[in-house]
Structures are given as C-alpha cells and as structure tokens.
Image (spheres, rainbow, N blue to C red):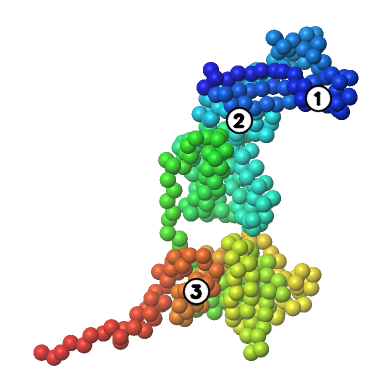
Amino acid sequence: MLNSLTIRYYLNEYKAKGTPEEKEKAKKYPIYLRITVDRKKAEIATNYFLQPKEWDESLQRTKKNRQINEDLSSTEQQVHDIANSLEKANKPVTAHAIKTFLTGKDKVDAYLLESYDRHMERLEKAGEVEKVTVTRYKETKTHLIGFLLERKLKDILLAHIDYKFLSDLDLYLLNQLVNHDTKKMGRNTANKHHSRVRTILIRAIREGHIIKNPYIDFKLKNTPSNRTFLTEDELKVIINHPLGENESLKRVRDIFIFSVYTGLRFEDAQQLTIDKIAQDKNGNYSLTIAQEKTSEPLSIPIFKPAVDIIHKYEDSDERKAQHRVLPRITNQKLNAYLKVIADLTGTKKNLTHHVARHTCATTILLSNEIPMEVVSKWLGHTNIKTTQIYAKITNSYMQKMAEKIEDKISIKGNAA
C-alpha cells in the first residue's frame, strides 16, 4: 500500500489571495501539499505564500527560505509516519485518511479514555438521552480510570485492548464495593459497565481505529436477578413503626412508601412535580411523566397512601420553590437511612429504594391479581419479559391464579 503513496508540493495559482489586480501585482501563490494513494488524491493548503521566482518546481522547495523548507520536509515525514501507523494498525491507508489525521481532525492513535470523553460529549450535545444515562457513563469512566491507574496507566490505545484486558477489567469491577459498603458489585451491574465500554469499541470500528471488537471473544452472561420485595406484613411494620419520632427517617419512609404505591424509580419520584399530578371529577388521582431511564411516557393511577404523602408535603420548601412532590435527597443517603429503618423495624431484608418498586410489582399489584400486561404498563417496562420475573418470585400470585382456574380444569372421575 505504501508503494502507491506519493507526495508533491506545488504553487497553486488559482488559490492566490486578493483581487485579480492584487494577485497580478503580488504574484504570490499558496504552497499546496498533494497526497496520492492508489491514484486517489487529497490536497492540503500550507500557510506559506511565494512568488513563482522563489519556488523550485523540480525540488518542490523554496530556493532560499530554509525555515519553510524544513517545515515542508517535516510535514512530508508526518505523512509517511501516519501512513505507517495506519498500516500497522490494519486501518485503511487512503489519501483522505492521511489528510484527516494530518489536519488534526482525528488522531492516528485513538485512546480509550479520549474516545470515551468524545462519546459522552456527543451524548450530551445530542440531547437525545436522559441525564441519568450520561451519569451512568460517567460512573463507568470512573471505574475505567481506577482500573488503568491500578495498572499504572493514564490511558490505553484502543488497538491494545484485548481479551486479557477485558478479563482483568471484569475482575476489577466485580471486586469494587457498592456505595462504599461491604457488598461487592454484582455480575449484572458489571455487565452494564462492560456494555458502555463495548459501545465505545463498536464506534471505534466504524471510525476505522480498530478492525475487531475484543468483546466478540469475551462473552458476558447475566445472572438471575434477586428481586427483593416486602411482604404485606413486613410493609405494615415499616408503615406503622414510630421510628423514634425521627423526622429525617420519617421523610425517607414517605419517599420509600410513595414508590411502593406508585412503582416509580428513584429518579422519577425525585423529579416528579405537582403539575404532573391530575385529579378527575370523581376525585381519583393519577400522574403522567416521561420516565428518566427510558424516556417513555408513563400514566398511572395513584393509590390513596401515595395521595396522602402528596398532601403531607404541600407546605414543604421543595413544593414552594421547585414544585417537587417529595423532599429532595440523594439515592445514596436515602439508602443509608433505609438501613437504619430496617434495623429499627427488625426488617431482615436489604432495604433499598428499589425494593419499593419491587414491592409495588409483587405485593401491591401481582398479589392482588392485577394482570401481567397491566403491571408491565404500570411499571413502565418496555418488555413484558422484565415484568414476568416478578411473577416467578411471588408464590402467592401463582397460587391465586391456580385457585382461580382450578374448578374450570378439574375432571371428576366416574365411580367404578
């Protein structure tokens, strides 16, 4: 391929600056670089202008200006270096590709963190993803930085990422503590981080930085999710407990219970404003939002316990200043308070905000014979398979469904 590469400098009289009169008077023309690979050309204007008498066409250099000549020779060497790098990286060597790298519109050596930053920048500028998606990408980047520092690296070439790199990254992720707790990252969470890295590598293939995605060899397997939820009795204990009359714990409990009776994710509940709540002529309440995670619209009725919580915070600072339905708190701080609530109430399960959503799906909806399709719509699932996971973990739902049809399928035997 490099045998077909040719480089030529020339004066381009058609690109001279100024009016025809000025051109004729000055007779200074720009020096152009022409790169040719397999008979296909790309041209780049230098920043130098010369009169024809100052240019040696045979040598493709100026006759007297040593500085310009050195710069031209340096650029020529860069062209050869770029072509060599492209060839070593098994990337297409074209005149256009060389021009792109030479003019700084791209780089020959693409690095992981640099590519990651460019991708995040595109996500934010495009405005087609929710803030939570960008936040998740930033979390993955933090893990990548930590992993690279552990290997004494500031960054790594995309072309150097291989099966071993991904395997080591996987082990690193699975040993990270979650929320500064003693619990290590789960397999499915680690897979989500891998998924974002894989997106960067797929883009790198399309941009010509690498020719093979190392994830082809490194297979990811999901583990069945352990969907923790509260039974009706466990839920009653938490609702009725005095919590030592601690107002902070009571606020956290309200936020938790609100999602138990709406099924809202943490971000959706925190972003919910009072203008998203509607009341019909019969006094029934409902809410309508665009979900933070999926951007899909969600419209659901609101049960009375959640309505009571809405009214409870009518005079709160968040309601007055920002029209928020619920008090503001970080997910990390809320989960820390929930652990305190679990200890006070004797709840043995690992209590987090997401348990509220799981409890809504199982104890509130499925166990009360709400059809699977309705539950799926209620929770804002884009795939009913996600909802079906809940049906597998609530025996009461399965038992009630069995009892409901038992008489219809019973076959009475005849007496002998």
Query: Label 1 crowding class (10 Å Cα cut-off): few <14, some 14-19, many 20+?
Result: many
Q: CA distance from mark 3 to mark 1?
A: 71 Å
Q: Position of residue 68 (x, y in %)?
A: 77, 15
Of labels 1 and 2, the one closer to you = 1
Tag 3: residue type? Val
Label 1 with label 2: CB-CB less than 8 Å: no
Residue that carries the numbered disc 1 in the rendered image: 16
Residue appearing at x 82%, y 15% in the figure: 51
Of labels 2 and 3, the one closer to you = 2
In this view, the residue in front, 79 or 31, is 31
Of labels 1 and 2, earlier in sequence is 1
Task: Kindly identify which numbered label has been placed on residue 375.
Answer: 3
Q: CA distance from mark 1 to mark 2?
A: 26 Å
In this view, the residue in front, 78 or 262, is 78
Q: CA distance from mark 2 to mark 3?
A: 52 Å
Judged from this view, the residue extending furthest toward the left is 416
